[in-house]
Amino acid sequence: MNTLPQPIAASARPAWMTFAHALHDLMVDKPLPQVPAASPSNPQDTEAQVETPDFWDGYNDVRPATNEATADDPEPQKSQTTPQRSLYTDLPLAFACAQIAQLLPDLPAMEAVMAPGAITTLVLSEHRLLDKAKKILSQQFEDIRDADPSRCGKISLANHVQFILEPEDHVKSKSKVAQDFTKALSYNAPIVILLCDATALRHPLQLALPKPLACAERSQAMLMFALELAFGAFNTVEEAELYQALPADADLNALTPEALDLAFRGQSALAIAAALNTLVARKKETGGAGLDALAGMGELSSVAATLVADLADYKAGQLAWSDLPRGILLYGGPGTGKTYAVGCIARAANVPLIAATVGGWQSAGHLGDMLKAMKASFDEARSNAPCVLFIDELDSLGSLQSKDKNSNYRTQVINEMLAQMGGIAGLEGVILIGATNDPHAIDPAIQRPGRLDRHIAVPLPGRLAIEAQMLRHLGADAAHIDLPAVMRLTRGKTPAELAAALRLARAQARQARTKLSTQDVLEHLRPAPLSIEREWIVALHEAGHAMVGHLLGVGRPTELRIDNNGGETRMRLNTSTGRLETVENKMAYFLAGRAAEIIQTSRVTAGAGGNVVSDLAMATELAISIERSLGLGQNGLIWEQSPSQLGRALSNDERALVAKRLNAAEARAKAVLIQHKESLLDLAEALCATRHLQEEEILPFLPDVAEDTGEVARTFSLEPTSQKEASDPSEFTV
């Protein structure tokens, strides 16, 4: 027995469909016969059907075989004959009828719109529906008046109803709607404002007018209504099958009106559904991914979903702009997908994405040219609202706290940036999203609430997120790729690295004139080999950071990674008391990688040293801060700038004090690791085996501590932060 879709219960059919059919009949002057219904008291009562014309009379010559359940065959069967579609289907009219029926579902609702002095705002899904809606409402108002002339004392004459339609020119829409509304207020006749974007109303109007009635999205039910107009009513089994075949509501809303028109040329309802699914798949391949691509990206996933929903409600007039976040700052290492995530958000919200980089502004020329380029980006966002304005490399703006020969230039740039952001804060419809690898290099005034309300870490994606990204990048090629084998080599890689590897693999396959193979992908995902000795030393180093950080209560390790450039440890820091012992514990954490090398190999590499964001640099910065600025050293209450803030060089006495503190911190790290050497080696071996460990994989190797040092939270700000800090001060990378 074939498995058929479960029939849709009659109660599940949207109530507005009946009224939508009536509105459509009114416009085309050809009533759509209704499927005869049995008497509620007796389902077998056929008397109720005698006066009802057969559904197919006057529509198509093809009459489908019945597919209702019978006593002999309790499972309903599908129709053996497909009805021919009508010659002409006005899709915009169908959608307009459906949306008006949802917004004004009955006669009392229509009468309320026609009342003298009434003001009603209707928000529909497409601009091309507005004129159709005006004609539908005009005709409906006339019919209400003609059916009962006695209502004229209570209801305004239809030809006195004033319609205000949003113009197609988005830039001029607010001023045009406002002008038309001002003129309409001179008369006591009812006003109907028809929009496809509730933000076309200026803010004062939004505050003064009643809340808009919004049906600003397409839905499967609306498509079903249009299909009924084209093919006639479907029985319950066919209806269930169609609902299963149609794309989801979110995918339908991502299609352009032209794409819908193209799909509706299909000669059967299922053919139209298949065409819609093809267009959705093609759009996803060429137009980029939406929110589903952000699954597994931590807090960003939920924040993005909330923002997209809020933008939809705002566009529909259901949410005040003051309730939306003013801006978002995304931070994380290079290649983690910050730019990609912003594109997903804009596509999911179906709003323009205005992208700029601080480097791009700087490349415009001298200071005046840069400021002009900056202003142009903000002006473009204003003219395209509602939109997302994305500014990358925000840390390149610098901070007013830094004092050097470029201070005057930096001051003017930051002041102009603050002025532009202030203008955005007062302008509706622009969501500002900034991105940086180093949030601590950005001036605090730029990051404060009211400018960038939310600060969100963008970590390396987890396994499920990576798998989803690989499937999306592979597309149709995924069918002949050994995904488990590929996934084993994706651990610890950034989305940018994965995308680059697949591009190289495809290029190799094209050059060989072959299909993309698993071997092509593996070849470009496989890391450059490190020597066995080098890999073991890196694993020891990173395991040392993780062990000491955990055992001394600095924080909880969230990720360990070995790559071609060395290794990385990410630590979510615990709350700090700010006491000397806490600062010394953090110094020991920074020096723990070097300590692990020494106790296991009796030798040390230069892995802890190097640039200003190295382990040695950050430990030294802390030791200097103890003496100069924290009031915890031998200099007592004296405060001075640290070297990273261009303070004076260390004196010989200070150098000796700092060296003493560093040696003591390294000795403490060694003592901790010697006590837990077996756990250290086990963790290092696990890291060597996979080259990447996440929090849940690290925790089993960590010894229990006598007292947990507290919740994951922001740390006490003890030192200038660096580019190697993963995000906010509650997460560190070494």
Image (cartoon, rainbow, N blue to C red):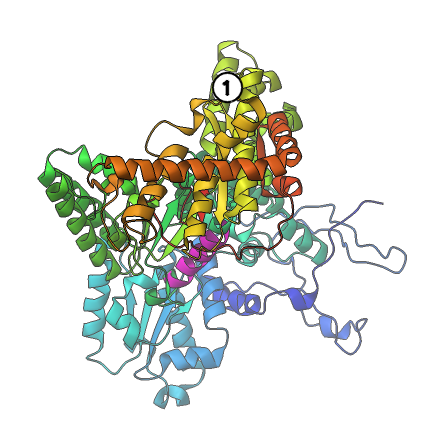
The quadrant of the picture occupied by the C terminus is: top left
Q: Is residue 57 above or below residue 81?
A: below
Task: Locate residue 686: give its quadrant.
Answer: top right
Residue 17 in the magenta stretch? The answer is no
Residue 303 in the magenta stretch? The answer is yes
Q: Which residue is nearer to you in this view: 207 or 61?
A: 207
Residue 519 in the figure: left or right of residue 154: right
Expressed as whole percent of the image width and height from the top left, the position of residue 185 reads 22, 78
Return the residue found at the far top: 512
Main SS, magenta region, reads helix
Expressed as whole percent of the image width and height from the top left, the position of residue 614 reads 38, 32
Regarding residue 119, the answer to whether it shows in the image is yes
* Residue at the (47%, 36%) spot, across then down: 666
Q: Is residue 468 above or below residue 170?
A: above
Q: Which residue is nearer to you in this view: 540 or 458?
A: 540
Q: Which residue is nearer to you in this view: 310 or 25?
A: 310
Expressed as whole percent of the image width and height from the top left, the position of residue 438 reads 34, 41
* Residue at the (53%, 17%) spot, across then down: 530
**Residue position for label 1:** 506
The quadrant of the picture occupied by the N terminus is: top right
Residue 16 in the figure: left or right of residue 8: left
Tell me the magenta residue range: 301-314
* Residue at the (67%, 46%) spot, across then down: 82
Other-residue count near label 1 (Cα within 10 Å), few / some / many at <14 / 14–19 / ≥20: some
Name the residue type under label 1. Arg
Expressed as whole percent of the image width and height from the top left, the position of residue 2 reads 81, 44
Regarding residue 724, the answer to whether it shows in the image is no
Q: Which residue is nearer to you in this view: 189 or 577?
A: 577
Q: Secondary structure at mark 1?
A: helix
